[in-house]
Image: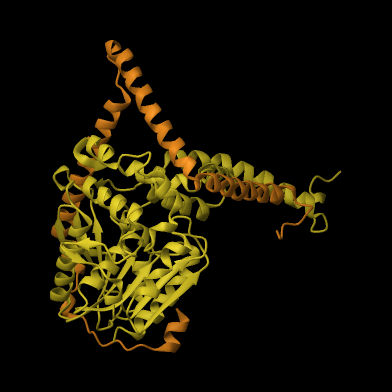
Amino acid sequence: MNAYRSDSPSDPTAARLREEVERSFQRTVKGIEFLTSPDPKVGTTPMDVLITRGTQRLMHYHPMASEVYRVPLLIIVAPSNRSYFLDMMPGQSLVEFLLKRGFDVYMLDWLPPRVDESRLRLDDYVTRFIPSAVQRVLIDSGEPELSVLGYCAGGLMSACYAALYAEGPLKNLVCLTTPIDFEHMTLHRNLVDPAYFDVDKYIDSLEGKLVPGEAFFQGGALLRPVSRIADQIKLWDNMWNDDYVKQYRMFDRWVTDALPLPGEYMRQFIKDLLIGNRLVKNELMLDGRTVRLENITVPLLHVVAEHDHLTPRGATKPLIEMAGSEDKGEVMLKGGHISVATGPKAVQRLWPKLDDWLGRRSE
Amino acid sequence: MSDVPPTDPFALSRELVSQWERSVNDLLTQHMSSSEFGKQMNAALASSEQTMKAIGSATAPLMVATKEDIAKLGKRLEAVEGQLARVTALLERLTPEAEGDAAPSRSIARTKRFSAADSKKS
């Protein structure tokens, strides 16, 4: 009997079986490669560092277009995350995409805070770090105004900045998956319920009063309790697929690479936002001033994810409702909290939308 | 509905993993939404902390590293990583290739106009 006869197109089951056997063999070979090779390089888009001051870092990416839009763009990420998730690798980098589309891109991101920065509060991020980065962008670009794009807690800080500095120089604001109404962040609130959790005792007991990045990662993992296991199964199943493995490694590295947070920032975040829900009540005080989202008057776009497990729909909804901008809109895209911003789906869904919305307002 | 062919056992097994992930995640997150969960979770954490302290006292004479010691080392490592990132950032500013490639931001032509047709192509 001819062993290859079963390979004919008329015998799909045998062909499928053969494909699985081949994949199984490749899994073993590539599994060894996976365990022995170093992490893929990320965040490789050429840039200059304009500011490094403690935890604060401002970067300017080298333009990739012969001419750029007049208005520079400042991206602000959450203090808990490394910024390279927006610059994973060529072809899958939001930063690179925006540069090629003619934007002059700056990024405000965060280095691990030092022990002497454990007393930093949300006030410091919104009324010190963002304004100083904004001033530097204006000086560097020679322009009188700029656009800001904030992701998650970076979006929250950007919205607070826009509300407190309504007189300018902000021209456009884009927020991605930004929590505003913390009443809807049920699991987070349960974990820090004052009836069972003493936030002061927790923060004061921390070494150096810095919340370890591990705590943030575990908190996120808790929201999808079995996904880590399922991800491992899927990884093994796709071990033959180089693209899948590369993606997995980059995202896994980023998800587990959370930054430590200043204890005071976390204390304030839990008390004022998660428990007190003060932002949505117009009661959040930063540097002695009340943050009123109605004071946001610049063109505003809020991009939310349909399957966001970290910031549910109810938490993101009030931003557009409360902002005072005449030119404002919300776009809900398919995807989760991370995949809406970066990854193969974001390339098709979010990025062209950003290009279109910002491009029209950046001349 | 799933579009998995009913005759493909490999595809079916993958679909089963996805379904299991979805349903167990939904079930557990539903449970975690109750206030009772917060109570249980914090009680479990407190109890775990007590147990670790007891184990720490019991194993102290053995001179083995405790979880606390490892956590302290982790902290030191994080601090070292932070310093390293700052040094790297400073070095990146000093390297000749960074300076050579960098176009002064003010010298870029800020003349790009928005084109709807061009945007649709992206």
Above or below, comparing residue A126 to residue A195 in the picture: below
Colour in which chain B is shown?
orange
Residue A271 horizontal/vertical position (percent): 29, 51
Answer above or below: position of A344 versus B107: above
- Which of the pair B108/B113 is nearer the observer? B113
In the displayed structure image, the side of residue B56 where residue A338 appears, left or right: right
Chain A display color: yellow
Callout count: 0
Left or right of A126 in this view: B4 = right
Direction top: furthest residue:
B61
Q: Position of residue A38 (x, y in %)?
A: 38, 44
Q: Residue at the location (18% across, 75% down)?
A: B105
Q: Is residue A239 visible?
A: no
Between A46 and B100, which is closer to the camera in this rendering? A46
Residue A191 x, y percent position in the rendering: 40, 44
Residue farthest right in this picture: A1
Colouring scheme, one of rainbow, by chain, secondary structure, one colour: by chain
User: Would residue A203 appear left or right of A228 to someone viewing this image?
Assistant: left
Residue A49 at x, y = what percent? Answer: 18, 62
Image: A238 above or below A157: above
Quadrant of image for the N terminus of chain B: bottom right
Kindly indicate the quadrant of the structure image that contains residue A143.
bottom left
Q: Quadrant of the C terminus of chain B?
A: bottom left
Q: Is residue A120 visible?
A: yes
Q: Residue at x 47, y 64 (%)?
A: A313
Residue at image point 72% right, 57% down: B4
